[in-house]
Image (spheres, helix red, strand yellow):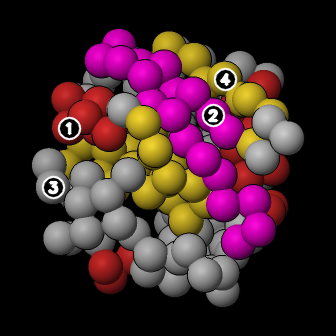
Amino acid sequence: MLKAEIITEKGKMQVHFYEKDAPGTVKNFVELSRKGFYDGLTFHRVIPDFVIQGGCPNGTGMGGPGYTVDCELDGENQFHDRGVLSMAHAGRNTGGSQFFICHSRNNTAHLDRQHTCFGKVVEGLEVIDQIQQGDRIEQITIVEEE
């Protein structure tokens, strides 16, 4: 089982990935994380009771890794509940490095099967509520467990 620890200025969030539902998206996120792509980037978009979004190398919401990944929308876990990690994009199959984490289900149901859910925060949910626009991702560490 693959897991991640997202270390931020406000604390740590532990993520369990949806490897079965979104293998390509998980693989992409894991590879970028292992390369240190996310280290030092900011949460450039924070909307209370909606999402915190990061992963843009430009800090503007317009940047990416230089390639795109396909959406994976058919799995069982494609629901944007509190703590869900999902791929941001500018239209179907245009995601790359930007991701968001949901504050709650209140304003995210319309994203179901439109954006790829590829993991969920299982520890450190309170950190989501503390993140403000401009806060940094210090590091994302990938952990493999049997």
- From what the image shows, is residue 91 above or below residue 124? below
- The disc at residue 129 is 1
Quote the CA–CA distance across marks 2 and 4. 5 Å
Q: Residue 34: image x %, image y %? A: 78, 26
Residue drawn at x 55%, y 65% as measured from the top left: 117
Mark nearer the N terminus (2 vs 4): 2
SS at badge 2: strand
Quote the CA–CA distance across marks 4 and 1. 21 Å
Residue drawn at x 57%, y 17% as measured from the top left: 139
- From what the image shows, is residue 49 above or below residue 70? above
Q: Is residue 45 visible?
A: no
**For residue 71, side relative to residue 23 (left or right):** left
Q: Which quarter of the image is occupied by the C terminus?
A: top right
Task: Assess whether mark 1 and mark 4 are in contact (beta carbons under 8 angstroms).
Answer: no
**Tally of numbered tags:** 4
Residue picked out by circle 3: 49
Q: Which residues are magenta?
A: 3-21
